[in-house]
Image: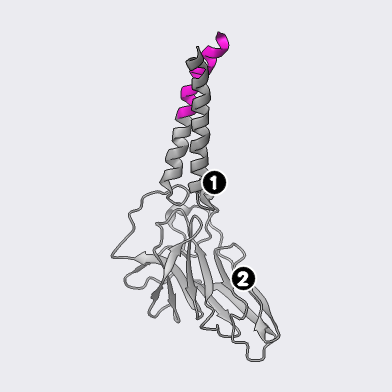
């Protein structure tokens, strides 16, 4: 009788431990991947996109106080590109305000060797960046396209594109740093397409497995709990 009574409690305790492990291993933004991603506004929508809104632009005026530009972030109205600046990120040269503009390109360049999965955006400013304080640039992409591996930059959208050191950010975003302005887009080398596997919550498998184990443990304890109540 004692074993029957303690077993459901032990199973629930195990479930609690597994839940704690799952919560500890989940990176910030993991659960964002379970909700439907925001629809992407394409310049050149793929056939599977359906209804589409045109991408938006963005503008920011950054104050300069005591010869140092403020920390701030410029972004498009739809949030598909965000660029953040540290304090003193600009070479101000006596300016009191720095204007930053983000404009989506109205065409979709297809340079040799690169497959873009995002729109191309031109980022300009009324002052150059301080090379010692690079800006952080984030591009959002669509779940209808493969994950990009790089952010690319060019001074001319019809010219040469250079890959920037990049890393995945929150679900459906990719990040990089830059010390110059120009045109930006995210994609991958056309000679090395991504596998195309679907990732849930940014591809973190361990928390999903642990969550499944929690469900199994709880369900296994239910019949014992019912039997105990009947007795």
Q: Which residue is mark 1?
A: 35
> How many residues crowd around disc 1 within 10 Å: few (fewer than 14), some, or many (20 or more)?
few
Query: Left or right of 18: which side holds 195?
Result: left
Does residue 221 show up magenta in the picture?
Answer: yes
Query: Residue at point 48% right, 16% down?
Result: 3
Along the line of sight, which residue is nearer the eye, 6 or 12? 6
Can I make out residue 19 in this image? Answer: yes
Q: Quadrant of residue 128?
A: bottom right
| Secondary structure at numbered mark 2 | strand
- Which mark sits nearer the N-terminus, 2 or 1? 1
The percent coordinates of residue 102 (x first, y second) are 57, 73
Which residue sits furthest left? 191
The picture places residue 90, in percent across and down from the top left corner, at: 59, 83
Q: Mark 2 — residue?
A: 73
Q: Nearer the viewer, residue 197 or 208?
A: 208
Image vertical order of residue 37 relative to residue 174, above or below: above
> What range is drawn magenta here?
217-231
- Please indicate, yes or no, whether residue 107 appears anywhere in the rendered image: no
Seen as rendered, the residue at the extreme front is: 2
């Amino acid at each position: 009788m004692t074993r029957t009574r303690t077993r459901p409690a032990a199973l629930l305790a195990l479930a609690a431990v597994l839940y704690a492990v799952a919560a500890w291993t989940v990176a910030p933004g993991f659960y964002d991947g379970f909700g439907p991603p925001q629809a992407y506004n394409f310049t050149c929508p793929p056939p599977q996109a359906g209804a589409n809104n045109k991408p938006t632009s963005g503008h920011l005026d950054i104050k300069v106080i005591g010869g140092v530009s403020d920390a701030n972030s410029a972004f498009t109205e739809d949030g598909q590109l965000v660029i953040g600046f540290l304090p003193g990120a600009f070479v101000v040269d006596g300016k009191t305000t720095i204007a930053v503009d983000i404009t989506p390109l109205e065409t979709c360049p297809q340079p040799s060797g690169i497959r873009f999965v995002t729109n191309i955006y031109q980022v300009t400013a009324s002052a150059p960046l301080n090379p010692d304080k690079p800006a952080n640039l984030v591009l959002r992409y669509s779940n209808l396209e493969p994950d990009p591996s790089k952010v690319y930059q060019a001074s001319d959208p019809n010219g040469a594109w250079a890959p920037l050191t990049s890393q995945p950010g929150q679900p459906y975003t990719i990040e990089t740093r830059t010390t110059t302005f120009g045109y930006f887009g995210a994609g991958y080398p056309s000679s090395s397409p991504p596998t195309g596997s679907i990732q849930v919550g940014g591809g973190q498998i361990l928390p999903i497995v642990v969550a499944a184990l929690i469900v199994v443990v709880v369900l296994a304890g239910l019949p014992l709990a019912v039997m105990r109540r009947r007795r």
